[in-house]
Amino acid sequence: MYVAIEGIDTAGKSTQLDILKGKFPNAVFTKEPGGTKLGLKLREMILNGEANSSLAEMFMFLADRAEHTKEIIVKNQNKLIISDRSFISGIAYAKDKKIEDLIELNRLATSNNFPKKVILLELTKDELQKRLSKKPNDSIEKRGLDYLLDIQARLRETIIKLDIEHIFIDASLNIKDIEKKIEDFINE
Ligand SMILES: Nc1ncnc2c1ncn2[C@@H]1O[C@H](COP(=O)(O)OP(=O)(O)OP(=O)(O)O)[C@@H](O)[C@H]1O
Ligand SMILES: Cc1cn([C@H]2C[C@H](O)[C@@H](COP(=O)(O)O)O2)c(=O)[nH]c1=O
């Protein structure tokens, strides 16, 4: 089963994934962008802000996703796969593109291999500001609070629009409480 953890920058995805690796030792843990050798090169170029064109950036994420689908998702389809982000981030972060167009582009990139379950960690503006202030910000994070909160709303909208089995979790809850909610959702 293919499961994705979604959330804007600093929502707590990596923190939860580190715990989940101990709870699901036989699962395949991966991420977008950067889940493959090619994806790591694409991730570095994107997060260093090397694309001047938003369309070029979008296609770089789609290229990462196509490689990730072929090399990780399809090759491990009989296992539990838990991914840090997915095509849902791809749709939500491409703010200047139509969701309908993005859905079709992502169907092509993933050969229709969408996650079966999605966990969305959601931050308040205050908590996001606090967490962003504690770390160096990459080119996307530098676009600011309102940009990221709009992305968060698009993540929620996309999950609902595509009717994917999901759970929305308050990312400011205690780390252990969040983990239990995620574990129970994956196991249900
Ligand atoms: N439930 C929580 N309560 C308080 N702080 C948290 C919680 N979960 C994570 N954090 C802290 O928030 C920061 C960001 O967490 P983390 O790196 O896991 O987020 P992320 O979603 O992986 O971020 P990014 O997408 O930017 O890599 C870290 O300093 C982490 O310790
Ligand atoms: C998959 C995907 C991601 N993004 C953005 C979201 C983040 O700002 C970065 C990835 O960094 P992280 O450390 O993995 O959170 O890229 C995007 O804009 N489009 C996508 O498809």
Image: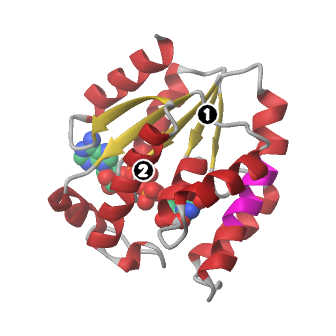
Q: Quadrant of residue 37?
A: bottom right
Q: Is residue 14 visible?
A: no
Amino acid tagged 1? Pro
Asked whether 173 or 135 is in front, the reply is 173
What distance separates the C-alpha of mark 1 from that of mark 2? 14 Å
Amino acid tagged 2? Leu
- Read off the residue under disc 2: 155
Name, please, the residue furthest toward the bottom.
52
Give the class, few, some or many, for how many residues have Cα within 10 Å of label 1's Cα (few <14, many ≥20).
many
Q: Is residue 185 left or right of residue 153?
A: right
Q: Is residue 85 above or below residue 72?
A: below
Residue 29 image position (x, y, % from top left): 63, 36
The residue depicted at 52 percent of the width and 25 percent of the height is: 22
The residue depicted at 64 percent of the width and 69 percent of the height is: 58
Q: Is residue 93 above or below residue 57?
A: above
The residue depicted at 59 percent of the width and 40 percent of the height is: 83
The residue depicted at 72 percent of the width and 47 percent of the height is: 107
Identify the element where label 2 is drawn. helix
Q: Quadrant of residue 169?
A: top left
| Marker disc for residue 115 | 1
Give the magenta range: 60-68
Helix, strand or loop: magenta stretch: helix
Residue 27 image position (x, y, % from top left): 65, 25
Residue 5 image position (x, y, % from top left): 49, 39
Residue 150 image position (x, y, % from top left): 33, 63
Identify the element where label 1 is drawn. loop
Task: Identify the mark nearer the N-term, 1 or 2.
Answer: 1
